[in-house]
Image (cartoon, coloured by chain):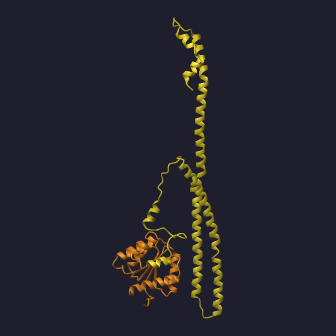
Amino acid sequence: MQIDRNMRILIVDDYATMLRILRNLLKQLGFENVQEASDGQAALELFETTKFDLVISDWNMEPMTGFELLRAVRANPATAATKFIMITAESATENVIAAKRAGVNNYIIKPFTSEILQGKIESVFEQRVA
Amino acid sequence: MDTAKVLDANIPDDGEQLASREDNAIPLREVIAMAEKVTAALKPLVRSLDKSMYRELKEMLNSIEELRGDISKVDPDDIFSRRIPEMGRELTAIVSATEVATNSIMHIAEQVIDADKSDPQSYAKFVEQHMMAIFEACTFQDLTGQRVTRVVQTIEVIEERIGVLCRMIENNQITPTASKVSETEKRNRARLVKGPANEGEGIDQDAVDAMF
């Protein structure tokens, strides 16, 4: 399946550096339609005005975590179908299981490479076809 | 030492003699003499009481001195007013230094990516110059390493002092009242926030992939 390089991507992280790294990696992968939010709450506010195709979010953020954002996105019928990738340092099995049960499409453990990011994005959109 | 036995041993006959007097009249000098004998007889007893009380008081004093010594070793003022704030400043400086260095390196990388590649020679020179800037930016590691060492040393001092407190608690000199789990820890547990795993803990990307 050909991935739409112009899809709307929302990256969420409380570290400006991480947002910059993600933006640059996505740019190198051909995705330039990217918006940023510094935590789950700020991300939800962006959802009020914009329909995103993909959310790439960190877990550990204040005041709203990426996990809480995931549940909020899935709970709202208007955003429930949005693809969601968690990129986080939280590598406990219970975290991955909890995220999967909450409806995450894929899970990347930091530190990661652009190849991993690309692979997960492709994998997430292949799921749509399947 | 038994008071009655002391008196019996030292003035055995006087009491009987006095009790056996038929006129019931006791001259003052005999009473004084009797009192002096009683006082003399009781002296060793009083001395021994003094010694045992002194011993007990001395032990109490030693315990108090020891406790004071241990508490002064903990030196909470030094921990809270100097060491912890200093550690906070060091960690803040580390975060700041790594952030500055990361941003510098990313800025350089962005410039290299966006550079005009039409002239290979000038592009190669441009890249070389920027690579040198990356090396310069990487010098932050030396400084942050030194700061981390200082933080570790402070933690060791605090650990040692907490050890003193723990020993006092074990000896029942102090009863702990503080909650073992802080509010932040409780909140993080509820939100499944633990932070990066240490080496050998947590699962790797392959294991995560297998779960999906």
Q: Quadrant of residue A103?
A: bottom left
In the rendered structure, the answer to whether residue A101 lies left or right of residue B112 reads left
Q: Colour of chain B?
A: yellow
The reply, left or right, for residue B190 in relation to residue A15 is left
Q: Quadrant of the N terminus of chain B?
A: top right
Say whether residue B84 is visible.
yes
Q: Residue at x 61, y 20 (%)?
A: B40
Q: Nearer the viewer, residue B134 or A124?
A: A124
Q: Give coordinates of residue A70: x percent, y percent.
A: 40, 75
In the picture, the quarter occupied by the C terminus of chain B is bottom left
Q: Residue A128, position in %: x, y?
A: 39, 85
The residue at the point 66 percent across, 84 percent down is B129
- The outermost residue toward the left is A77
| Residue A31 placement (x, y as % from top left) | 48, 86
Q: Which chain is orange?
A: A
Q: Is residue A41 visible?
A: no
Question: Residue A72 at what x, y percent from top left?
Answer: 38, 74
Which of these two is toward me, B212 or B186? B212
Residue at 46% in and 84% down: A121
Residue B147 picture quarter = bottom right
Image vertical order of residue B81 relative to residue A59, above or below = above
Residue B136 or residue B64, whichever sits in front: B64
